[in-house]
Amino acid sequence: MKDLKRIFLIAIFALGSIAVQAQNEDAINAYNEALELAQSKNYDAAITKYREAITIAEGLGADGEDIKSRSEKAIPQMYFSKAVDAYNTFKSSPTIPNLDTAIAQFGEARTIGAESGDDQIRDRSRGVLAQLHYQKGTMLFKRENFVDAEASFDQAIQVNANYAKAYYQKALVHKKNKPNDLDGIISWFDRAITVGEQVNDGAVVRQANESAHAELLFRGAKSTEQGQSTRAIELLQMSLEYNNESGDSYYRLAEASNKLGNWDNAIRYANQALTYETGGNTDKAKIYYELGVAHQAKDEKGKACEAFENASYGSFKAPAEHKMEFELKCESAR
């Protein structure tokens, strides 16, 4: 009787071993099928097979740990490879729908990477995702779809807060969407400068400084033309924060100061403009003209005559000579 029990137990153990062996083979077969599907770039099917291999391997306990581990590591890579294929499709046919597909795929790869603990896939996907949102923004900007372009740059910044170029483009598109929001426009240029300095992106820092300066210089000049000289001086002084050697800014400050009757300031600004103006006599003529106006107003005839003589070039030649001949009666005009 004891022998029968022993034989029965051996038979049960043998059957159990056969069942485990069969399961192990099933797990290996599923894993191998997944590899073949991955090599043929059938990523969705490969992901399904890897998950199947994991399920089978989990039933094997320690014996299935190797297959389970290999399959779990392969799945994030499948999502990333799938995203890369979507991006290659976009490169072959650069349309917004194809770009949206690539964005969605890299977003999914980033999520899977994070959930599975694959930091490399997570970070690589995040980097590409930020670039794709940026690329979409530039495409929409060129098509003058400024509202959606701004949203895309916002998403790029959300994905990568250190993306200096995205802040710069955000400033440009914000200017299109809200041209009267000067504070908002300048604040985005400022953030581009700050982030650019942090990540050593000198090109963005330079571009942002130049653009902020140009924007404030333009608005300052317009304010002077519109009779808002006090506001003009405020804007022009701000422009110097982005380029403190701007001959144009100092010239416009001299012009606005003359309109306000601040002759000493006009003289000071005009002399600074002459220091930084790198052009020839024709380029400097407008500055000398403002210098002459200020000296004339202060009854400084000799200095005024000298300034107007230096202003006698290009479009300022006639008005400067009129000043010398008929108003100041300069000796050089006789």
Image (cartoon, grey):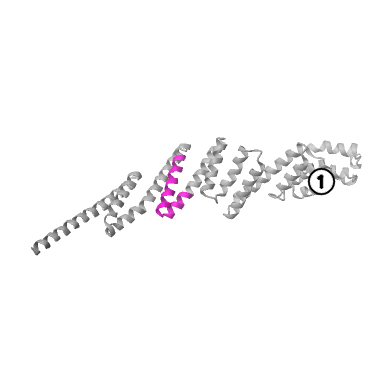
Q: Position of residue 149 (x, y in %)?
A: 55, 39
Q: Going by the image, does 188 lie left or right of 83? A: right
User: What residue span does the magenta drawing correspond to?
Assistant: 99-126
Instruction: Work out which residue is located at the far left of the displayed protein and give it.
Output: 1
Residue at 76%, 37% in the rendered image: 225
Q: Position of residue 140 (x, y in %)?
A: 54, 37
What residue did someone put label 1 on? 266
Q: Is residue 160 left or right of residue 17?
A: right
Q: Nearer the viewer, residue 2 or 74?
A: 2
Residue 41 seen: no
User: Would you say the magenta stretch is mainly helix, strand or loop?
Assistant: helix
Any magenta on residue 226? no
In this orientation, which residue lies closer to the viewer: 292 or 190? 190
Q: In this picture, is 48 found above or below 10?
A: above
Residue 25, given in percent of the width and then of the height, sits at 23, 53
Left or right of residue 324: residue 35: left
